[in-house]
Image: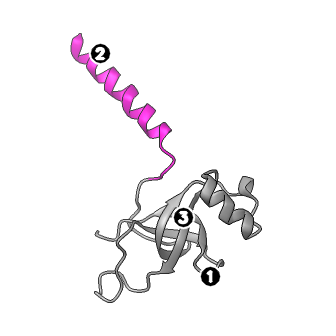
């Protein structure tokens, strides 16, 4: 009976942890946008990111996915010419000249 209680507690804890995080798990590919290397990523509600969005005329309420800050494109993965010391992300809108990228999802480029 104690085994069932432990399993239940672990399941509830895992569900709570998954719901508490805003960062989606890394995917293995980028099929919906451009592969970017950003200095940082975060929520549009983060004060520093919200300030950048405001300066660029982007409505903070319209942004629900991760926002990449100070981004540059990654053109070739694993070829040695391009590296990303931060978490690479796949972003759907990178039309802000590298200042920000919108609609980002973490990508695992080590697969």
Query: Where does residue 71 sit, x and y in percent of width and height?
Result: 52, 75
* Position of 101 relative to 77 (above/below): above
Residue, disc 1: 97
Q: Are marks 3 and 1 in contact (CB under 8 Å)?
A: no
Q: Nearer the viewer, residue 70 or 81?
A: 70
| Residue 10 counted in the magenta span | yes
Q: Earlier in the sequence, mark 2 or mark 3?
A: 2
Please determine whether, in this image, residue 25 is positioned above or below residue 6: below
Label 1 or label 2, whichever comes before in sequence order: 2
Q: Quadrant of the C terminus?
A: bottom left
Residue at 29% in and 70% down: 110
**Dot 3 lies on which element?**
strand
Q: Is residue 108 left or right of residue 48?
A: left
- Given this view, does label 3 or label 1 mark the residue nearer the observer? 1
Q: Is residue 55 above or below residue 80?
A: above
Q: Which residues are magenta?
A: 1-24
From the image, tell me which residue sits under label 2: 5
Label 2: state its secondary structure.
Answer: helix
Can you identify the residue that label 3 sits on?
104
Measure the C-alpha gap from mark 3 to mark 1: 15 Å
Residue at x-position 48% and y-position 51%: 23
Query: Could you tell me which secondary element the residue under label 1 belongs to?
Result: loop
Relative to 42, is 77 on the left or the right?
left
């Amino acid at each position: 009976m104690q085994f069932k209680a432990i399993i239940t507690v672990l399941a509830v804890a895992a569900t709570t942890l998954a719901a508490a995080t805003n960062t989606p798990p890394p995917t293995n590919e980028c099929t919906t946008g451009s592969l970017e290397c950003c200095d940082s990523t975060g929520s549009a509600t983060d004060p520093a990111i919200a300030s950048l969005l405001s300066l660029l005329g982007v409505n903070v309420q319209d942004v629900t996915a991760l926002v990449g800050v100070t981004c540059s494109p990654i053109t070739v993965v694993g070829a040695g010419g391009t590296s990303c010391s931060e978490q690479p992300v796949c972003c759907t809108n990178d039309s802000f000249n590298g200042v920000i990228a919108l609609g980002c999802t973490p990508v695992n480029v080590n697969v």
